[in-house]
């Protein structure tokens, strides 16, 4: 139906501003985030990066999707992985099929060629959607197969970025974050509570996760020049 198509187009433009409005101030801020991440680790190149939040609906999926686009726009070969195996969204944002995906690879029901898709959103950007939602997401992400898959993907792509569930909801972000070179936390202005952020950071620290910074979104433009701010960990 035309209504559904228009709704999808509206959501796509809202979620992927770096694609549909690359010259906007917010797109420029995503490029600033990209640069700050690239310089956040002096002695080690970031090959694997995960994105999470303390609670749901704070913008983590939109943030990592736009960050993946800006990395690909630099000419890097990027893989965006939907590791939110409970409420996956990346196949909708990137408009790729989700018949096969991460869970299919982990359970050996598909090959990478079947599960990984090129996307029209950006050259050099590939997407590995979640695949069918499993009954045991945490166990799959903690498996030896997942560890080996991360190594294989990081050898095949210049950067692999992961969308993960919120920290306070489930343990998935801690599990996957501990296997990545860096993790960023997304906060929503006037919504994320300090106690939740502190608790999330404590849980990530306990799992030896390297939190390299935070992204605050939906900041009132009267307060700062742009709608996004990146703060590197002190």
Image (spheres, rainbow, N blue to C red):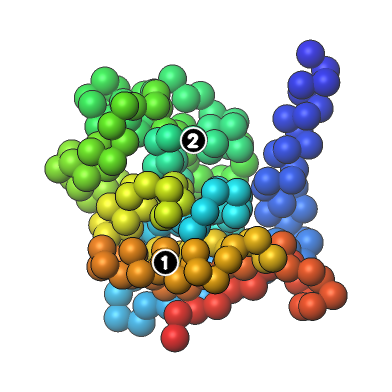
Between 233 and 39, the residue placed more toward the observer is: 233
Q: Which mark is residue 121?
A: none
Query: Height in image: 26 above or below 118?
Result: below
Quadrant placement of the C terminus: bottom left
Q: Give the residue at x 22% y 25%.
A: 108
Q: Give the residue at x 81% y 71%.
A: 221
Q: Residue furthest top?
A: 1
Mark 1 surroundings within 10 Å by alpha-carbon count, few (fewer than 14), some (14 through 19), many (20 or more): some
Location of mark 2 (residue): 87
Q: Secondary structure at mark 1?
A: helix
Q: Position of residue 3 (x, y in %)?
A: 83, 21
Q: Give the residue at x 58% y 37%.
A: 94
Q: Mark 2 or 1 closer to N-term?
A: 2
Q: Secondary structure at mark 2?
A: loop
Q: Position of residue 212 (x, y in %)?
A: 42, 73
Mark 2 surroundings within 10 Å by alpha-carbon count, few (fewer than 14), some (14 through 19), many (20 or more): few
Location of mark 1 (residue): 199
- Answer left or right for 102 relative to 92: left
Q: Quadrant of residue 223?
A: bottom right
- Answer left or right for 105 relative to 218: left
Between 107 and 47, the residue placed more toward the observer is: 107
Q: Is residue 147 visible?
A: yes
Q: Residue furthest bottom?
A: 234
Query: Height in image: 154 above or below 204?
Result: above
Between 191 and 218, the residue placed more toward the observer is: 191
Q: Residue furthest front?
A: 195
- Answer left or right for 175 relative to 71: left
Q: Is residue 30 visible?
A: no
Q: Position of residue 214 (x, y in %)?
A: 52, 70
């Amino acid at each position: 139906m035309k209504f559904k198509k228009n709704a999808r187009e509206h959501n796509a433009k809202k979620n992927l501003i770096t694609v549909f409005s690359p010259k906007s101030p917010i797109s420029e801020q995503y490029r600033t985030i990209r640069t700050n991440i690239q310089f956040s680790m002096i002695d080690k190149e970031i090959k694997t990066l995960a994105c999470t939040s303390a609670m749901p609906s704070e913008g983590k999926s939109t943030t990592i999707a736009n960050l993946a686009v800006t990395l690909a726009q630099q000419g890097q070969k990027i893989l965006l992985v939907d590791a939110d195996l409970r409420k996956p969204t990346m196949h909708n944002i990137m408009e790729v099929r989700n018949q096969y995906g991460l869970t299919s690879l982990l359970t050996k029901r598909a090959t990478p060629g079947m599960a990984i898709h090129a996307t029209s959103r950006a050259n050099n950007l590939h997407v590995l959607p979640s695949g069918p939602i499993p009954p045991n997401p945490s166990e799959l992400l903690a498996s030896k197969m997942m560890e080996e898959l991360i190594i294989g993907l990081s050898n095949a792509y210049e950067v692999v970025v992961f969308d993960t569930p919120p920290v306070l909801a489930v343990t998935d972000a801690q599990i996957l974050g501990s296997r990545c070179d860096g993790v960023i936390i997304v906060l929503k202005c006037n919504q994320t509570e300090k106690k939740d952020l502190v608790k999330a950071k404590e849980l990530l620290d306990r799992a030896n996760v390297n939190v390299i910074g935070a992204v605050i979104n939906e900041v009132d433009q009267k307060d700062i020049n742009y709608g996004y701010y990146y703060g590197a960990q002190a």
